[in-house]
Image: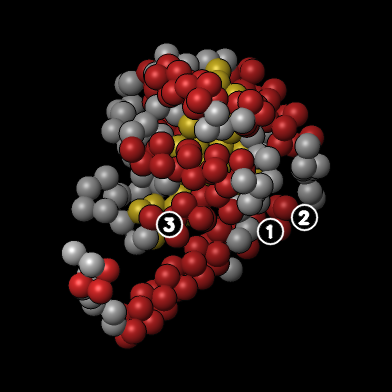
Amino acid sequence: MSHSEIKFLQGPQSRWQELTFSIKVLIEFIRGFRTLHFAGPCVTVFGSARFKEDHEYYKKTKELSGEIAKLGFTIMTGGGPGIMEAANKGAKEVGGRSVGCNIVLPFEQHHNNYLDKTVNIRYFFVRKTLLIKYSYAFVVMPGGFGTMDEYFEALTLIQTKMLFQFPIIIFDTAYHAALIDHIDLMKQKGTIAEEDLKLCLFTDSIPEAIQHLKINAISKFGLKPEKSRKSFWWLFERGY
């Protein structure tokens, strides 16, 4: 077949649908910005929605998130059950701040009961942008496809310098052993650089994770307690 005989395919190209979709996305972003504006510096915790309260991952997440909240960070999650609930609960139990950015799905979509503020989002890419926008660090707990998607999204943005070099903590080395091996393989094959390995901390230690945040988030970015923060949080809680 010669080049002149190729017939290209044609798909639907509705300008009206593209316009309405763009408007819906803009509305989602505005709703998210309005809800989370006064959240303060956050640490976003990623992880599976499927672990119950009696699971070791749930318990460890709650403990770690409580210690992070004691540093003054707001704990941000996807707002759902499982690891997300554990993180938000851990923050609330120590008197910390807790927010969620919940995705609307046919399943696993209900928000948990440990949120000071939450916003429901229909589009995954809007939700990921909001989770990243307000965060000074990311914690990756055991999870599935969604957790890996969120992790590599944040990691790619940091690697390409589209984001500041915020710390990423991968917690539970046994669960993530295959991931660690694959990252090492990428380094061996030259698809990532040696320095890219420094972008993540793989650990099983809560004290090590907390120390990492103190050095690479609080000290590095000059985060300090603010007397005016209380008044901002008062407005935040009331939806202004």
Q: Secondary structure at mark 3?
A: helix
Query: Under tag 2, what secondary structure?
Result: loop
Looking at the picture, which amino acid does disc 3 mark?
Phe
Q: Can residue 22 be seen in the rendering of this structure? A: yes
The image shows residue 137, relative to residue 130, as above or below, that is: above
In the image: residue 2, left or right of residue 75 = left
Residue at image location 42% in from the left, 70% down from the top: 25
Q: Examine the image and state in which quarter residue 14 appears.
A: bottom left
Q: Position of residue 13 (x, y in %)?
A: 29, 79
**Residue 27, picture quadrant:** bottom left
> Which is nearer the eye, 152 or 231?
152
* Mark-to-mark CA distance, 3 and 1: 28 Å
For the residue pair 10 and 99, the one nearer the viewer reads as 10
Neighbor class of circle 1 (other Cα within 10 Å; few <14, some 14-19, many 20+) is some
**Is 131 positioned to the left or the right of 120 in the image?**
right
Q: Residues within 10 Å of mark 3 (few under 14, many from 20)?
A: few
From the image, tell me which residue sits under label 3: 125
Q: Out of 192 and 8, give the one closest to the viewer.
A: 8
Residue at (46, 52) in percent of width and height:
128
* Amino acid carrying mark 1 in the image: Phe
Picture layout, residue 86 above or below residue 116: above
Q: CA distance from mark 2 to mark 1?
A: 7 Å
Q: Residue at x 18, y 64 (%)?
A: 1
Q: Nearer the observer, disc 3 or disc 1?
A: 3
Give residue 232's mark.
1
| Residue marked by disc 2 | 228
